[in-house]
Image (cartoon, helix red, strand yellow):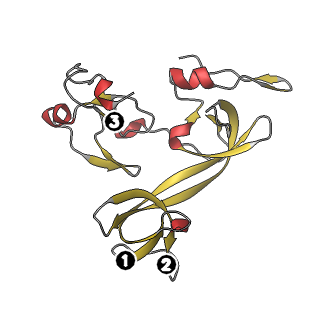
Amino acid sequence: MPLYMYKCSICSESKSGACVQCIWPKCYTYLHVTCAQYSSLVPQTLAGKSGFVCNKHTSEETVSISVGDEVYAKTGSSRLQYAHGTVGGIDTLKTYEVQFDDGTLCSEMLLRDIIVNDGAPDLGSCVKVKWSKREIYDARIIGYTTVPQYRVIFDNGTTNTVTEEFIYSLNEPLPRRVKDKLKKHTNGTRPVTPIPL
């Protein structure tokens, strides 16, 4: 659905301009940029995304997930199904923001797509970026973000690596869209069901 179709959570209008999504992980609140500024929301960067955080959130709200925790997470299937599992490991993924010579930006460039001589590039360094198999462009590193990635071992023995927008602690409520997609299967004796809200 186009961004101009969403209803602003501040003014409740859906026909007076495009809305942006709150950048808080797993939040699906939309707001007009001008309404956000009028409400004294300050643009910020959170988990590698720049934008606004709506008034629903506080810094104490984040749920920490550790190795060994039971979670609901996105499976590896293309249908975006969710299932019960256990966190088997936590790694970090570093993505780079690059500015190409023509002034365009790309904010989620992986190191494997950046041609450098030694190790990871420094901020401000000039690099070459592999855009496709045949296209290589000159660019400059203007920022980077480190995002946690969780390796989840599902009850049926399969694994998947997910970022924080696709993993839920058993202590946090599941959004309706996740509950609808939660994969219902059993692992011998334990039925997998979503947490009631």
N-terminal of the pair, mark 1 or mark 3, is: 3
In the image, 148 versus 128, the foreground residue is 128
Give the Cα separation between the discs numbered 1 and 3: 31 Å
Dots 1, 2 in contact, CB < 8 A: yes
N-terminal of the pair, mark 2 or mark 3, is: 3
Crowdedness of circle 3 by 10 Å Cα count: few (<14), some, many (20+)? Answer: many
Q: Indicate left or right for 94 with 124 as reference.
A: right
Labelled disc at residue 22:
3
Single out the mark in the foreground, 1 or 3: 1
Identify which amino acid the numbered label 2 is placed on.
Val
Identify which amino acid the numbered label 1 is placed on.
Ser
Q: Give the SS element for disc 3.
A: loop
At horizontal 77% and vertical 41% (from top left) the residue drawn is 158
Crowdedness of circle 1 by 10 Å Cα count: few (<14), some, many (20+)? Answer: few
Identify which amino acid the numbered label 3 is placed on.
Cys
At horizontal 52% and vertical 20% (from top left) the residue drawn is 176
Q: Residue furthest bottom?
A: 117
Q: Residue at label 1?
A: 125
Give the Cα separation between the discs numbered 1 and 2: 10 Å
Q: Residue furthest top?
A: 196
In the image, 133 versus 70, the foreground residue is 133
Q: Residue furthest front?
A: 134
Can you say whether 177 is above or below 90 in the image?
above
